Amino acid sequence: MPYHSTNRRVWVGPRRLPGTLYCPQRPSGLIIFAHGSGSSRLSPRNIYVAEQLVARDLACLLFDLLQEEEARDRHNVFDIALLAERVIEAIAWAPQEEGIGGLPLGLFGASTGAAAALVAAAEQPNAVAAVVSRGGRPDLAGAALPRVRAPTLLLVGGEDWDVLELNREALALMACEARLEIVPCATHLFEEAGALEEVVVRAGAWFLDHLTG
């Protein structure tokens, strides 16, 4: 669909983590992305999802959760508490940023980033209106899962067997509105024809329902 948007470089939080803000002319909400292990704000899959959400009038922030020197330490890449802290810093940063202040906020997490998003949602229940996990590891959020209050959608590929079972286990621990949806025939990275497009349709609907009512 045709739409007008602007993309601009931003520096997120007190550590000035590099990011890109994708913003439609009249955003109705803001989605903060939490990428998975080994990924960054330059992830082609997340950029694609962000551009499609912008077409639905949702602003999107993609940013690096770790500084360059931090990312060289593989332990940090899997440190859910550390990654969640950076997501919380982005949540605090957003209201002061031009063009997105005051917008209802959602979190979109992939892989280990989904766990970080859920921990952040549990810690910031009044700030986060919805969460979507794409091929995520919500089980790694551990004790935070029962404390999440934001409506949460877990999207998993039908052929991603191990992750699907881990998502079922995580879902059973959640007390909020939560749903597990399977994208048929998709594997972990949703590389199959039409799979990522299906993620966009479902994630977009979830965010619009819960951020804009």
Image: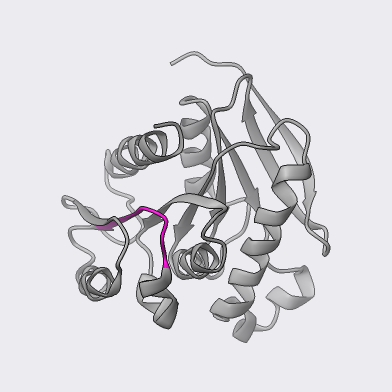
In the displayed image of the protein, which residue is found farthest to the bottom?
Answer: 75
Q: As displayed, is residue 3 above or below residue 203?
A: above
Q: Which part of the image, by quadrant, shows the N terminus?
A: top left
Q: Quadrant of residue 74?
A: bottom right
Q: Is residue 52 left or right of residue 90?
A: left
Q: Residue 24: give x, y in percent of width and height.
A: 60, 24
Look at the image and say whether residue 55 sits in the magenta stretch: no
Q: Quadrant of residue 179?
A: bottom left
Look at the image and say whether residue 151 sits in the magenta stretch: yes
Q: Nearer the viewer, residue 98 or 20?
A: 98
In the displayed image of the protein, which residue is found farthest to the front?
Answer: 126
Q: Residue 158: give x, y in percent of width and height.
A: 18, 58
The residue that appears at 55% across and 59% down in the rendered structure is 34
Q: Disc count in the image?
A: 0
Q: Nearer the viewer, residue 173 or 15?
A: 173
Q: Which part of the image, by quadrant, shows the C terminus?
A: top left
Q: Residue 165: give x, y in percent of width and height.
A: 20, 73
The structure's colour scheme is: one colour
Q: As displayed, is residue 201 above or below residue 118?
A: above
The residue that appears at 59% across and 70% down in the rendered structure is 84
Q: Which residues are magenta?
A: 148-156
Q: Is residue 193 left or right of residue 103?
A: left
Q: As displayed, is residue 155 above or below residue 211?
A: below
The residue that appears at 70% across and 46% down in the rendered structure is 94
In the displayed image of the protein, which residue is found farthest to the top?
Answer: 2
Q: Quadrant of residue 175?
A: bottom left
The residue that appears at 43% across and 66% down in the rendered structure is 111
Q: Nearer the viewer, residue 121 or 153?
A: 121
Q: Residue 77: give x, y in percent of width and height.
A: 59, 77
Q: Is residue 18 left or right of residue 167?
A: right
